[in-house]
Amino acid sequence: MHDILQKVRSLIQQDIQLFKFARKSINVIKKCSMCSWCCHNNVIFLTIPEAIRILAFTKADIKKIFEIKHYIRLKQRKRKCVFLRNGKCAIYDVRPFQCMTYPIIFNPLVFMKKEKVEIAHENDTFLFTCAPPNVSKKCTLSVNTDLFNAISLVRLQFLQRNYEVLATLLRKNMLRSVLISLAKKYPLHEFKEV
């Protein structure tokens, strides 16, 4: 048990560092209009640290906010994120990496499927634009191509470690108890400073 908790604590620290790296690397070209389009019809898979952070922040019942199978993901209600309330994100301060970086998707496969995001390349910089229908103010974020590649690599390595730990926790039927236990001790102050 001690070994697996150490691995989860290590993931939490890696998660915080990855958020810092991504936030520092992303430039806002056009600010988000907060239309909440990205909160509709999107499946948000969570890492273990993200689930713990959300539990620590909300103190909600796991069964009401997460779907747990061989993955953890945010539940949806009527094809909307469970945390979308009155058009606003109720967990904005602790939102998952996938939400924080949107419309940038740190995965090389994003270039193969561009249905919700417009992608351009200018002068060693990728420009990602959210593409909601019927919204005139589209947000655009940019990231240097080298930083995009570095963040993508670090993120993919992190996800691999996360899913190895997740598989162990699921196999040992310990995931829920570990999430709840560590949520009580999660360093929210460290994350909010990111």
Image (spheres, grey):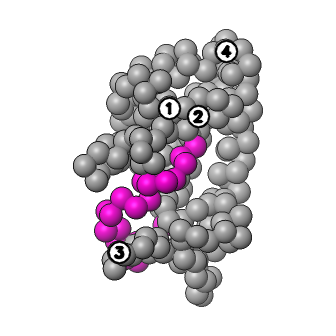
Work out which residue is located at the far front of the displayed protein and give it: 78
Lower sequence index among marks 1 and 4: 1
- Which percent across, then down, holds residue 150? 67, 62
Most common SS among magenta residues: loop
- Which percent across, then down, holds residue 23? 47, 58
Residue 18, above or below 57: below
Q: What's the amino acid at mark 4?
A: Asn
**Local crowd at mark 3 within 10 Å, few (<14), some, or many (≥20)?**
few
Instruction: Say which quarter of the image contains residue 158.
Output: top right
Does any portion of residue 18 appear in the rendered image? yes
Q: Residue at x 48, y 19 (%)?
A: 180
Task: Give yes or no for contact between labels 4 and 3 (Cβ–Cβ under 8 Å).
Answer: no
Q: What's the amino acid at mark 1?
A: Phe
User: Which residue is tagged 1?
Assistant: 66
- Which percent across, then down, holds residue 154? 67, 53
User: Which residue is tagged 3?
Assistant: 135
Work out which residue is located at the far top of the displayed protein and give it: 1
Does any portion of residue 20 appear in the rendered image? no
User: Which residue is tagged 4?
Assistant: 173
